[in-house]
Amino acid sequence: MRPLIFLKLGGSLITDKSIPFTERRDVIRSLASEIREALVETGSRLLLGHGSGSYAHTPAAMYRTHQGLVSRDSVEGWARVQDAASRLNRIVLAALLEAGVYAVSVQPSAAAVARKGRIVSWDTFIIEYLLENGITPVVYGDVVVDLQQGCSIVSTEEIFRFLSLRLRPSRVIVATDVEGVYTGDPKADPSSRKLDLIDHSTFERVFGYLRRPGGFDVTGGMAAKVSTLLEICEQTGAECEIIGGRKRGNVAQAMKGVRGLGTIIRWA
């Protein structure tokens, strides 16, 4: 069977997070072209995911959707977050189709069930059927039913974690707006250095970099990414890598098997 790749296009890569509901269409089109190039050359199967960036983040922050059904406005927030996430998804799908990638959207909010933000149930038959028939399923960060708090937001990495147990990808690639995982915020601290490799023995030290005040991601975003990817490595044996997606050709090269473009994540 042809190898299966999981690829995420980060929300900070395909949207401008500083401006609500602002996508980077030129970046999305360029990435779609790279994906097409790599698929044609390698013949690999692809499960594509993307973040929701400035689309879903705006209503999610307003309604505290990640906390669940916490107020009278929570149901409205649920609906608005789902709508925002799906609108960005249609923009990504349009670019993929224009580039010649036969992609079909798979809406997490219609199928996945979580408990405290972790997916516990999702019938993967449709995704597997699409892959078997040469179609690229496209998932995305979304709001889903949550058995403990009513609803929760699941990231694309969390979706990958759940699906990797069933689909067993050979590689997981996460493309972001920076070149990998750093010891500080590379946009604000020129002295921060990129880490070439993270494994289970170095994660605690790396976690300290990621969570310290003034570090790259005090909110836990990058720390959560790395933690979830490391869990995928442990459970499936797949290799993961966080790469920069803005440099032309990086995504295509990573899909073709080039290693070391960013930060490699392995269990051992």
Image: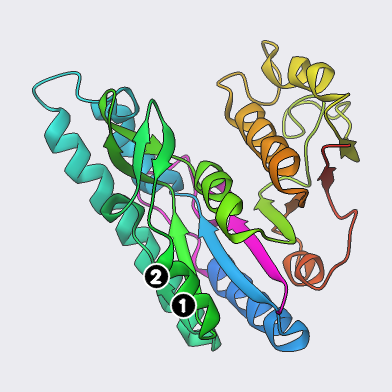
The scheme the figure's colours follow is rainbow
15 magenta-colored: yes
Apparent side of residue 15 relative to residue 235 in the rendered image (left or right): left
Q: Quadrant of residue 184?
A: top right
Report x, y in % for residue 124. Answer: 43, 61
Hey, what amino acid is under mark 1?
A: Leu
In the drawing, what numbered circle is on residue 130?
A: 1
The residue tagged with tag 2: helix, strand or loop?
Answer: helix
Residue shown at the point (89%, 26%) measured from the top left:
191
Report x, y in % for residue 215. Answer: 71, 19
Highlighted magenta segment, given as a residue range: 1-25
Circles 1, 2 touching at the beta carbon (< 8 Å): yes
Residue shown at the point (52%, 58%) measured from the top left:
49
Label 1, residues with CA under 10 Å away: few <14, some 14-19, many ≥20 = some
User: What is the residue that sits farthest to the top in this orientation?
Assistant: 213
In this view of the protein, which residue sits in the foreground, 207 or 80?
Answer: 207
Location of residue 112 with respect to 3 vertically, above or below: above
Distance of label 1 from label 2 (alpha carbons)? 6 Å
Q: Quadrant of residue 144?
A: top left
18 magenta-colored: yes
The residue tagged with tag 1: helix, strand or loop?
Answer: helix
Q: Quadrant of residue 173?
A: bottom right
In the drawing, what numbered circle is on residue 126?
A: 2
Report x, y in % for residue 237. Answer: 78, 48
Label 2, residues with CA under 10 Å away: few <14, some 14-19, many ≥20 = few
